[in-house]
Amino acid sequence: MKSKKAKMFLETWQTKLRGVPVNSHDDAMKAVEMAEEEMKQKAIEAFRHFVEDYCNESGRKDIAAESEHYLKIFNELINANQ
């Protein structure tokens, strides 16, 4: 799990609910991981839109032309904390 706050919450939640089957915790962990992945994909799409569309419209065609390079760097940065 990438989110330290979410992991800490789930660990606290699990200890409060003694007797809850472990798979409930596993399901919750999976849901958080899915949400994190969805947020990451939304961030990538927002950055793609900015680099390709906004930069092109605002006259920064040099940045728009190099969009694949900037998207590659952004992906590396967003995945660095895994």
Image: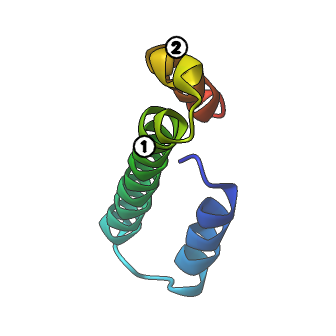
Q: In this view, does 23 lie above or below 74?
A: below
Type of residue at label 1? His
Q: Where is residue 11 in the image (x, y as percent from the top left)?
A: 60, 67
Q: Which of 72 and 52 is in front in this view?
A: 52
Within 10 Å of the Cα at label 1, are there few (<14), some (14-19), or many (20+) other Cα atoms?
some
Q: Position of residue 73 (x, y in %)?
A: 59, 20
Q: Quadrant of residue 32?
A: bottom left
Q: Position of residue 54 (x, y in %)?
A: 50, 43
Residue 60 located left or right of residue 21: right
Which residue is under mark 1? 49
Q: In this view, does 29 lie above or below 55?
A: below
Q: In which quarter of the image is residue 19?
A: bottom left
Residue that appears at 53% across and 48% down: 1
Total label count? 2
Q: Quadrant of the C terminus?
A: top right
Q: Position of residue 48 (x, y in %)?
A: 44, 37
Q: Nearer the viewer, residue 32 or 58?
A: 58
Residue that appears at 66% across and 34% down: 81
Residue 8 located left or right of residue 64: right
1 or 2: tag closer to the N-terminus: 1
Type of residue at label 2? His
Q: Quadrant of residue 70?
A: top right
- Give me the disc on residue 61: none
Within 10 Å of the Cα at label 2, are there few (<14), some (14-19), or many (20+) other Cα atoms?
few
Which residue is under mark 2? 69
